[in-house]
Amino acid sequence: MKKMLDLKTEDEIAAFWDEHDSTEYIDWDKSKSVRMVNLQKSAKTISIRMPVDMIETLKIQANKNDIPYQSYLKMLIADGLKAHG
């Protein structure tokens, strides 16, 4: 097995793996499965226009549920996607 280089940035790591085969550096026969339960999904900021009264209703309902309104909005969208998916 080859010794791994000390790569500092994500760009360096990505460029390295674009050019190299992991089997040269990792003995996959000795690998073990793991669950990464605390990973966060990548997020992207969007802008959405909503009527002011709808935003106020959203904030009131979120406050009743003791959660930030943006988190509450994400929950509502996720529920809607599941229901109509």
Image: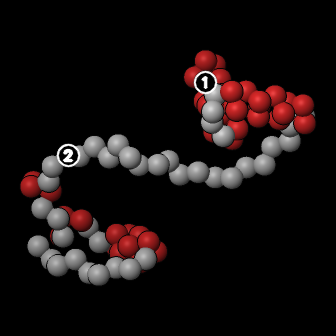
Along the line of sight, the residue nearer the viewer: 16 or 65: 65
The x, y position of residue 68, in whole percent, is 66, 40
The disc, 1 or 2, on the residue closer to the chain's N-terminal end is 2
State whether residue 84 is above or below residue 50.
above
Which quadrant of the structure image shows residue 20? Answer: bottom left
Distance from label 1 to label 2 (Cα)?
31 Å
Along the line of sight, the residue nearer the viewer: 23 or 76: 76
Which quadrant of the structure image shows residue 53? Answer: top right
Along the line of sight, the residue nearer the viewer: 4 or 61: 61
Quadrant holding the C terminus: top right
The x, y position of residue 36, in whole percent, is 32, 46
Q: Which residue is at a point 61% across and 18% down the rendered structure image?
A: 83
How many neighbours does mark 1 have within 10 angstroms: few (below 14), some (14-19), or many (20 or more)?
A: few
Tell me if residue 44 can be seen. Answer: yes
State whether residue 34 is above or below residue 67.
below
Q: Which residue is at a point 28% across and 43% down the rendered structure image?
A: 35
The x, y position of residue 29, in whole percent, is 9, 54
Q: Secondary structure at mark 1?
A: helix
How many neighbours does mark 2 have within 10 angstroms: few (below 14), some (14-19), or many (20 or more)?
A: few
Left or right: 55 in relation to 84: right
- Whether the residues at callouts 1 and 2 have beta carbons within 8 Å, the answer is no
Left or right: 34 in relation to 38: left
Q: Which residue is at a point 24% across and 65% down the rendered structure image?
A: 22
Question: Which residue is identified by label 1?
Answer: 79
Q: Secondary structure at mark 2?
A: loop
The mark closer to the camera, 1 or 2, is: 1
Q: Amino acid at mark 2?
A: Ser
Question: Which residue is identified by label 2?
Answer: 33
Tell me if residue 15 can be seen. Answer: no
